[in-house]
Image (tube, rainbow, N blue to C red):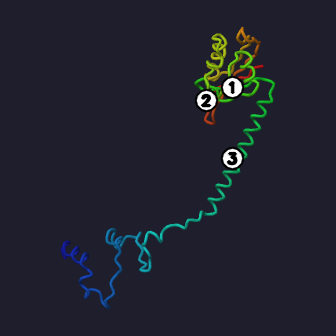
Amino acid sequence: MKSSDHIYYYVNWRNVPEYFPGGKFPTMTSNNRINGPDNPQTSADPDRDDNPSSLQEPSRRPADLRTLIQNFKESEKQLNFRCSLLQAIIDGANAAIFSVDTGCCYTNFNKKHIDDIRKLYDTPIKPGENLKEAFPVEKDFLKIDNLIRQALAGEEGSVSDYFGDNTHSRRYFDLSCYPLSNESGFITGAAVIAV
């Protein structure tokens, strides 16, 4: 048998009923025609329904997905509670506390720091604002900037000096600065505590 004869008989098998005793023809689906009848992925079950709409999963979510979502919501509540508790501790401290990112922009601060900046410079502050805007007196900004740059290099530091604007108020502070790092150990910012 030549290869062209084989293809001829394979393609035209329905036209030759005498090759199949009893008149029973094998079920040929479009998948069989493409992949061949010997493909282990194709089903030999003649009752199989290849209709794509019957293969769709029901619209009901599996129970484990609901449990996963419920656990996520519970974890989120616990995290929010812990963040609120931490913020309450920071706000209740008798020291001004603030943190900055690597670009010297505020990421967080407590109420005492807000009050101190308002009294010293009459400047409102907000998260994301650069420290240069919060500390308009150049020498004050340079002292804090140097301290933060030291912390961003991975070293703790401290400075003690007077801060403030002569027209509003000047006050003596002891500043301590610490590097902040993520789980991988990369420094992501600095925290400053002013007493």
Residue 3 is situated, as x and y percent measured from the top left of the image, at: 20, 72
First in residue order: circle 1 vs circle 3: 3
* Residue tagged 3: 76
> Mark 3 belongs to which amino acid?
Glu
Q: Looking at the image, which is closer to me, 1 or 5?
A: 5
Q: Which residue matches tag 1?
A: 191
**What separation in Å lies between label 1 and label 3 (alpha carbons)?**
25 Å
> Left or right: where does residue 25 sit relative to residue 122?
left
- Amino acid marked by disc 2: Thr
Q: Quadrant of the N terminus?
A: bottom left
Task: Of the two numbered discs 3 and 2 on the same chain, state the one appearing first in sequence.
Answer: 3
**Image position, residue 73 (x, y; %):** 68, 51
Secondary-structure class at tag 2: strand
- Report the amino acid beneath label 1: Ala
Pinpoint residue 105: horizontal percent, then vertical percent: 61, 25
| Residue furthest to the top | 166
Label 1 vs label 3, nearer the camera: 3
Cα distance in 3D space between marks 2 and 1:
10 Å
Asked if residue 74 lies left or right of residue 28, the reply is right
* Quadrant in which the C terminus appears: top right
The vertical placement of 38 against 163, above or below, is: below
Q: Are marks 2 and 1 in contact (CB under 8 Å)?
A: no
Q: Quadrant of residue 188?
A: top right
Quadrant assignment, res 136? top right
